[in-house]
Amino acid sequence: MAEKPSTPRAQPKPPIDAAPQRRNRRGPTSATHAAAHAPQVVHLQSGVWRRTRIDVLEHPGLRPTPARLRETLWNWARHHAGGDLTGWRVADVFAGTGVLGLEAASLGASAVCLVEQHPAVAAALRATCARLKAEAAGVQVVRADGLSWLQQQATRSLQLVLLDPPFAQSHDLGLQAIKAASGVLAPEGAIYFEAAEMLDAATCAPRGLALQRHSRVGAVHGHWLVGASP
């Protein structure tokens, strides 16, 4: 009697998670990769340029002021000015993205100087100002060392000095900048200072300043400094 042909044995099915495992070995999907490397943007919150997008250059240490802290800052400024910033002369020292100085211009400041030392960051600032036609609103970009620039300004020439030094240097460099800024501050003016730690009254007093307001968002401290009463 002839033998029946043997039936081929069925091949085992691959585990259902084999395909996902192969995808994981190739790394993240292109969509995830694109999202991780998407350029950062911030938006102005107040004034005529409200909701305007500001692109943030990918540069070590370039860190825009948190949105909540910026909102607090401009509430302080409007309260101090009794309205908007019409007629104010403003310097945004260590300007970085320029978002602080540009928002001052958006709120009516008549002259705003964005001071930035790094050439690539200064070039990005100029591109932003060109897009906004900010020169017509009294905004200029100056490539210079912030401390040196402040020391060359006329006394009592500025109503608002915005100081946001590199975060890692915010204490030592910041105190030097506050000293320099106090010499150019108009009697009715104020200094906004951003740092990794809170200033105290004893630090401000020798510089002829008083800490009027303070706010903290995460690790960032914002200070509103005014001339101390005689």
Image (tube, rainbow, N blue to C red):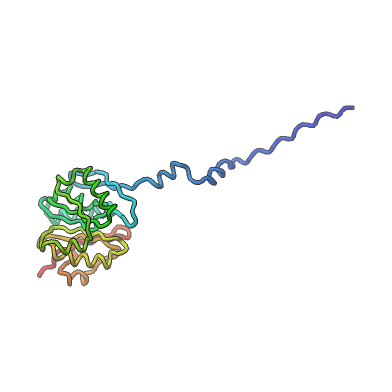
Query: Nearest the camera: 135 or 86?
Result: 135
Q: Is residue 61 left or right of residue 22?
A: left
Query: Nearest the camera: 161 or 122?
Result: 122
Q: Is residue 35 left or right of residue 118?
A: right
- Where residue 10 sits, quadrant-wise, is top right
Residue 22: x percent and y percent? 56, 43
Residue 202: x percent and y percent? 21, 72
Q: Is residue 129 left or right of residue 57?
A: left
- Where residue 221 sits, quadrant-wise, is bottom left
Task: Say if residue 73 shows up in the picture.
Answer: no
Residue at the image position 60 percent from the left and 40 percent from the top = 16
Residue at the image position 11 percent from the left and 59 percent from the top = 157
Residue at the image position 14 percent from the left and 49 percent from the top = 138
Task: Say if residue 178 shows up in the picture.
Answer: yes
Residue 66: x percent and y percent? 29, 54
Q: Residue furthest top?
A: 1
